[in-house]
Image (cartoon, rainbow, N blue to C red):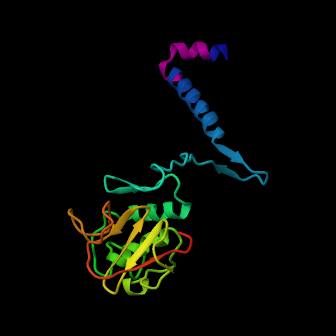
Amino acid sequence: MQMALGAARKTPALRNLIAVLALVGAFLVVADAAHATTPGGLTTITPEVEAPTEETGPPGKATLVNGRAIPPVNAPPAVKKVIAAANKIRTKPYIYGGGHARFWDSGYDCSGAVSFALHGGGFLGSPMPSGPMESWGEGGRGRWITVYANGGHAYAVIAGLRWDTAGNTSGTGPRWHKSLRAAATGPFAARHPTGY
């Protein structure tokens, strides 16, 4: 070994080869730490996962920040999921019939947007037009979620914010609004999911 190191000092190519071999050896030691061997002899790579960070606002009412709703800290998990689902489509355009054939769509109409949000919380298994929403769930206003529907329009109030495709000043489509007053006209049936 002493002879090889002495020769390496005299030969730059051999010196570079030894340096490369040392780096490869160090890499293999580090890479091996990321592998876990199971009792059956299978080798798996453990993925790096970020710690979950759930952003919440003050208790009681959702907060609107740059067009995105932040659920209140005391909201039930299903309500937080409804808000998270709605946030996913909050910049999509209005498309008549959008969200009716499938939940994921290129744009949404009023009931398609409400359906998408409710589906996120596990309250709907398939999209629903506004007319049938008049008899969906329980009658009256809910504590966390209220769907307002008639034969021509539907919107929801979720944790104190209005989720609606009407009444936008910057384009149309599903958006959050601080005002709870409907931008559309007509009498609405108020409905809510049981317990919410």
Residue furthest out toward the right: 39
Magenta highlight range: 5-14
Is residue 144 placed above or below 39 in the rendered structure? below
Q: From the viewer's side, name the closer residue of 49 and 187.
A: 187
Is residue 37 placed above or below 90 in the rendered structure? above
Task: Find residue 22 and report its horizontal and vertical position in percent.
Answer: 58, 27
Seen at 44% across and 80% down, the residue is 127
Task: Find residue 157 and report its horizontal and vertical position in percent.
Answer: 40, 68
Per the image, is 113 magenta? no
Seen at 56% across and 46% down, the residue is 48
Q: From the viewer's side, name the closer residue of 140 and 183.
A: 140
Q: From the viewer's side, name the closer residue of 156 and 93.
A: 156
User: In which quarter of the view is residue 190 placed?
Assistant: bottom left
Residue 99 visible in the snapshot: no
Seen at 49% across and 23% down, the residue is 13
Seen at 63% across and 42% down, the residue is 34
Task: Find residue 89 and report its horizontal and vertical position in percent.
Answer: 36, 65
Q: Main secondary structure of the magenta part?
A: helix
Seen in the image, is 81 located left or right of residue 134? right
Q: From the viewer's side, name the closer residue of 99 and 31.
A: 99
Seen in the image, is 12 located left or right of residue 26? left
Task: Find residue 16 and report its horizontal and vertical position in percent.
Answer: 50, 24
Seen in the image, is 80 located left or right of residue 69? right
Per the image, is 10 magenta? yes
